[in-house]
Image (cartoon, rainbow, N blue to C red):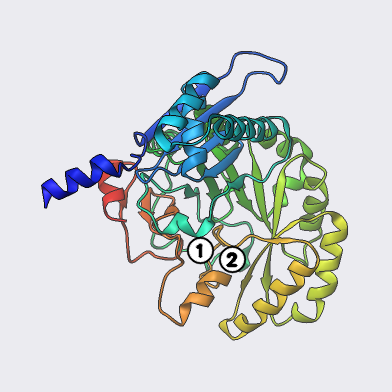
Amino acid sequence: MDRIAKLYDRFFPTTKPLPAGIYHFLSPTGPTGPYRLHLRLEPDGAGVLIVNASTVLHLNNTAAEYAYYFVNRYTDGEVIQHFIKRYDVPAQKASDDYAQFKQRIRTLIETPDLDPVTFLDFDQKTLYAAAVLAPYRLDCALTYQVMDMAGQGVAPVDRVKRELTPDEWKVILDKSWKAGIPQVIFTGGEPTLRPDLPDLIAYTEKLGQVTGLLTNGLRLAEPDYTHTLLQNGLDHIMLVLDTESDPAWEAVRHILKEDIQTTIHLTVTEQLLPEMLPLLDYLGRLGVNYISLSVNDLALKDYLQAVRQEIAERGMKLVWDLPVPYSNFHPVALELAEHEETPQGAGKAWLYVEPDGDVLPSQGMPENVLGNLLYDPWEKIWAKH
């Protein structure tokens, strides 16, 4: 059998993926200024390219290979020769494809306010299928404390006995970056209750990670505080909107004026149903382009599909895979509930870290602790996913 396999490889050679791992690029100063690229190649040849610590670009195998040559500073001629040799393609096609790839990267570098996660000729579903070096996102619950008394009984403060210090969170962020995790979401509880939030955002920016914030938005009504977060490197926001709160609406109107992608999260309740369509219309007039949904009652889950259709008809995009505070009533989770499955990306595309450092496959899964990221080696935690 080995002899037959060797003969097959001789006459019908297959292209081997490039070495999996993490690669970095820092451009010289130029017309567009210096820019940073971080490439993570997967064992199957696909990849993730982080552009200026603000956009995560998922790449198919061909685009990932182009990125590998680009980040490692191969000349155009060398890249074309590699593709001719590896794939037996005409030189002109290899040249045209590589030029198109570089143009797309330049567009990402030069275009402000991009989606923090984009896909380049890549099927999003494959994120959950192949073996990967590490998840694509780490959801960090900095605290389970909340601002309002209504949420006090929901947060699992009895299970989590302490919160990590700022230096301990930096240890976790260091481990996540070294593991190749390109994006961090700061959530809670209410993460803006942590006075070290701006510093932690600056730390992820310094490492090179894309950084998001999940918040009730009340602190974002303070322009100085918001500008501090943005200046420290915050890339996108999900604002959990209390439609009865005037300060929350003030925060929405304020943040939409800023150069940052903002998702508005709505919790569908029985009381909100009659107001849902006018509410979506108003959000559209304000300039909201991204909506996230959950329900506070499983009896309302069938209504989610109708709301999703209304969102699509208004030209808005549904954001479905960000963590929702204290809720398993998530659109995708509800769709999978009948099959007793967890969301497909849980433990694969993302992991969730509690305020004490315990790692869960996803929010709301405390029965499946993978380890503690402060004390345990990353390799031990990832081996359990």
Q: At 46% from the left edge and 32% from the top edge, which residue is drawn?
A: 83
Query: The residue under label 1 is which amino acid type?
Result: Ala
Q: Is residue 341 left or right of residue 194?
A: left
Where residue 330 sits: x, y (%)? 56, 70
Q: Which residue is mark 2?
A: 151
Number of other residues with Cα within 10 Å of mark 2, as a class: few under 14, some 14 to 19, many 20 or more:
some
Residue located farthest toward the top when viewing the structure as drawn: 29
Tell me: residue 164, above or below residue 38.
Answer: below
Tell me: residue 328, above or below residue 239.
Answer: below
What element does badge 2 sit on? Answer: helix
Can you tell which quarter of the image residue 263 is in? bottom right
Q: Is residue 152 left or right of residue 358?
A: right
Give whichever of 236, 103 is nearer the camera.
103
* Residue 376 appears in the rendering: no
Where residue 348 sits: x, y (%)? 40, 55
Q: Which residue is mark 1?
A: 155
Q: At 44% from the left edge and 27% from the top edge, which residue is drawn?
A: 82
Where residue 249 sits: x, y (%)? 80, 57
Q: At 75% from the left edge and 68% from the top edge, which residue is drawn?
A: 311
Residue 2 - label? none
Give whichever of 250, 261 is nearer the camera.
261
Query: The residue under label 2 is which amino acid type?
Result: Gly
Number of other residues with Cα within 10 Å of mark 1, as a class: few under 14, some 14 to 19, many 20 or more:
some
Counting the numbered discs, the total is 2
State yes or no: discs 2 and 1 in contact (Cβ < 8 Å). Answer: yes
Tell me: residue 272, above or below residue 148.
Answer: below
Q: Which quadrant is the C terminus positioned in?
A: bottom left
Where residue 199 sits: x, y (%)? 56, 32
Residue located farthest toward the front when viewing the structure as drawn: 11
Tell me: residue 114, above or below residue 308.
Answer: above
Give whichever of 114, 284 is nearer the camera.
114
Can you tell which quarter of the image residue 198 is in? top right
